[in-house]
Image (tube, rainbow, N blue to C red):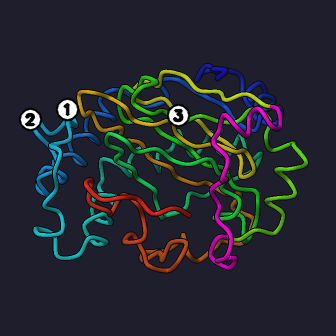
Amino acid sequence: MQETAVDADPSEIQRRFAEDAYVCLPGFFTQDDVSAIREAVFSRLDEAGEITGTPADGIYSGTSQRREKIADLGQFWREISESWALRRVTHSRALHELCDVLLEEASIPQDYLFLRASNFGRKTLLHSDSGFFARMTDKVVTVWISFGDIPLHLGPLFVMEKSHQHPRVKNALAGFDVARDKDKKASWSETPIELAEQLPSRLLTRHMKPGDIVVFGMHLLHGSLDNVDSDQRIRLSCDVRYQAQSKPQDPRYFGPHPGGTTGAGYGELVGAIPLDEEWHIR
């Protein structure tokens, strides 16, 4: 995955994004920012019996009492997702200004966040974001943020190089809406390696460090590698979307009580699922 310096000229950042549909900016946020988020998130998971040792280390206990101890899993995940430690990063002025550059106009962040705590065996299947977030406009970008040290065996984000330009991908995504087209999945049935060989393309990733970000467009295929860490470390990351302020806003993702993709609020997210249960597939 090609890196772009945080202090690169805005025109260079725009050029790379226009060419590749992604930019990777190492160290965009500070270690202090990340440490505060890890403490805020993992201390709550510790309350649910999912953490062993010092909470901020993010070590999975191998079990969960989330359903027994938490009355409303959706509200639990909403409280975590709306914590000040997290929002001061995802809705920061620095990120806002970066997205202004990438969208080439004033941007606005969605209120609904996708926070993920991925323990051993978890991965995010190959997909694009257009079927989730491009209902009103495709002038939207996803910002993926690393909240820890994420080597390859911990399952970092990957993108499929220039997949947004491939006719097969374009045809598959044309007009697709996850919430409306219930007979079709957003996730591809092929494994990332299989599809990369078929197109052909390459899978791009890197050892992610605390505070690194990757910003990508709606039509670029991406996912995350499997977390196979033998020490049971949890990979913590977050997605937030920014869109052109001039474009219509999808009410599912904006406002004080966003319903999310299906209308179920934060309860629909895989993050709300106890760590010892399977994730759903969309």
The answer to which image quadrant residue 1 occupies is top right
What kind of secondary structure does the magenta stretch mostly adopt?
Answer: loop
Q: Secondary structure at mark 3?
A: strand
The residue indicated by pointer 3 is: 213
Tell me the crowding category of disc 1: few under 14, some 14 to 19, or many 20 or more residues within 10 angstroms, Cα based. some
Q: Nearer the viewer, mark 2 or mark 3?
A: 2
The residue indicated by pointer 2 is: 53
- Residue at position x 48%, y 64% in the image: 111
- Residue at position x 10%, y 67% in the image: 69
> Which span of residues is magenta-colored?
178-200
Q: Nearer the viewer, mark 3 or mark 1?
A: 1
In this view, 3 is above or below 60: above
In this view, 75 is above or below 105: below
Distance of label 2 from label 3 (alpha carbons): 28 Å
Q: Are marks 2 and 1 in contact (CB under 8 Å)?
A: yes
Q: Position of residue 240 (x, y in %)?
A: 52, 52
- Mark 3 belongs to which amino acid? Ile
Q: Is residue 42 magenta?
A: no
Q: Secondary structure at mark 1?
A: helix
Whichever of labels 3 and 1 marks the residue nearer the N terminus, that label is 1
- Residue at position x 27%, y 33% in the image: 233
The answer to which image quadrant residue 78 occupies is bottom left
Q: Position of residue 132 (x, y in %)?
A: 63, 65
- Mark 1 belongs to which amino acid? Asp
The residue indicated by pointer 1 is: 57
The answer to which image quadrant residue 172 occupies is bottom right
Tell me the crowding category of disc 2: few under 14, some 14 to 19, or many 20 or more residues within 10 angstroms, Cα based. few
Tell me the crowding category of disc 3: few under 14, some 14 to 19, or many 20 or more residues within 10 angstroms, Cα based. many
